Image: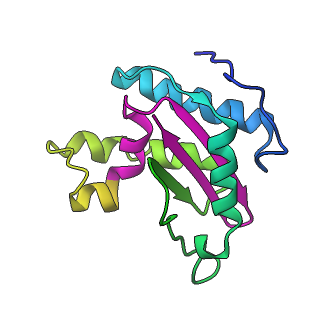
Amino acid sequence: MSTMLATSASAAVSSISPSDQQAIVNETNALREQAGAPPLSWDDGVAAAAQSWADNPLSTPNGPGSLGHSPSFNGAENMSTAGPAAATGQWAAEKSKYDADPNHDPNSSGYKTQWGHYWNMIQSRFTKIGCGARSGVTVCQYRP
């Protein structure tokens, strides 16, 4: 599946390269297509917010390897200690746990610990994605 970015990719907005931005959108949209959700597009505004949170020391509150979600984000947010090129695949790998859980309840422990990143990626209500990164943290945010 080939999907073009809806806005011009800008390394100035996010530390994620334009080629990685395109890969993130393509990988996410391939999953969305399998799940019956419409494609989403890269949004520089969402990417700027994700980059701002990635740059905030509170995104890694206890140093490398720890992650803390943005307390003010309105949408969904995935975080990883993997780099941008690997983070999407890491989250996509949760699909088997999602498929094994018949409830798909976002308030459940399964969402919080096993398949929530995948769930965020395939939600049809989200139409925009933007990501940011720094050493030790990748943040992708999803918005309607």
Kindly identify the residue that appears in the image at 60 percent across and 54 percent down.
Answer: 139
Q: In the picture, which quadrant includes the C terminus?
A: top left
Residue that appears at 69% across and 59% down: 52
Residue 121 painted magenta = yes
**Residue 3's x, y, as percent?**
63, 18
Q: Is residue 21 left or right of residue 116?
A: right
Image quarter where the N terminus lies is top right
**In the image, residue 141 above or below residue 113:** above
Furthest residue to the left? Answer: 102
Q: Residue furthest bottom?
A: 62
Residue 20 or residue 126, whichever sits in front: 126
* Among the 4 quarters of the image, the one containing residue 59: bottom right
Relative to 99, 30 lies left or right = right
Instruction: Give the magenta range.
Output: 115-144
Percent from the top left, x then y, of residue 80?
56, 59
Residue 34, placed above or below residue 23: above
Please give left or right for residue 3 compared with residue 68 in the image: right
